[in-house]
Image (cartoon, rainbow, N blue to C red):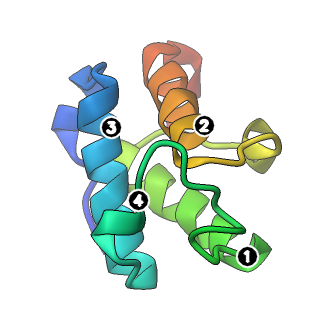
């Protein structure tokens, strides 16, 4: 099991979060890194289904050490949406696991 990455606690840059998310998507789903652009749609462009989305949420929880409620990601449709949701979550201290 991967330990939470402490540097994520201070990660506020959308570029840093995007790069971390890209590594997670490649690791979990073997997605071509070139496809993982901010405007890429999860379901249509990256072939991530609802079960994959749950796996992604669990991995983000594991690596950030933050509680993530699936309903917080209900309106996420693109890579940029995930980056923004993670950025907001990291800024909100009430999500501490």
What residue sits 28% from the left and 50% below the top? 20
**What residue is disc 1 on?**
49
Q: Is residue 69 left or right of residue 66?
A: right
| Label whose residue precedes the other's in the sequence (3 or 4) | 3
| Label whose residue precedes the other's in the sequence (1 or 4) | 4
Determine crowd level at label 1: few under 14, some 14-19, many 20+ residues with C-alpha closer than 10 A: few
| Label whose residue precedes the other's in the sequence (2 or 1) | 1
Image coordinates of residue 36 in percent, x first then y, are: 41, 59
Image coordinates of residue 4 in percent, x first then y, are: 28, 51
Which circle marks residue 81 in the picture? 2
Which circle marks residue 36 in the picture? 4
What residue sits 62% from the left and 47% below the top? 78
Determine crowd level at label 2: few under 14, some 14-19, many 20+ residues with C-alpha closer than 10 A: some
| Secondary structure beneath label 1 | loop
| Label whose residue precedes the other's in the sequence (1 or 3) | 3
| Secondary structure beneath label 4 | loop
Rounded to the nearest whole Å, what is the CA distance between mark 2 and mark 1?
16 Å
Query: Who is closer to the viewer here, 55 or 81?
Result: 81
Picture layout, residue 30 above or below residue 43: below
What residue sits 73% from the left and 78% below the top? 51
Query: Who is closer to the viewer here, 67 or 17?
Result: 17
Q: Which of marks 4 and 2 is in front?
A: 4
**What residue is disc 3 on?**
17
Residue furthest bottom as drawn: 30
Residue furthest left as drawn: 7
Q: State if disc 2 and disc 4 touch (CB < 8 Å).
A: no
Determine crowd level at label 4: few under 14, some 14-19, many 20+ residues with C-alpha closer than 10 A: many
Q: In this view, does 78 lie to the left or right of 63?
A: right
Image coordinates of residue 89 in percent, x first then y, are: 53, 26
Q: Which of marks 1 and 4 is in front?
A: 4
Q: In which quarter of the image is residue 31?
A: bottom left
Rounded to the nearest whole Å, what is the CA distance between mark 1 and mark 4?
15 Å
């Amino acid at each position: 099991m991967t330990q939470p990455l402490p540097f994520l606690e201070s990660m506020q840059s959308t570029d840093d979060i995007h790069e971390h998310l890209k590594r997670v998507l490649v690791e979990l789903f073997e997605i071509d890194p070139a496809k993982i652009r901010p405007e890429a749609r999860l379901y249509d462009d990256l072939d991530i289904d609802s079960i994959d989305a749950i796996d992604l949420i669990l991995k983000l929880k594991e690596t950030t050490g933050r509680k993530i409620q699936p309903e917080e990601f209900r309106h996420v449709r693109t890579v940029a949406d995930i980056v923004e949701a993670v950025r907001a979550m990291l800024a909100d201290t009430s999500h501490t696991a």
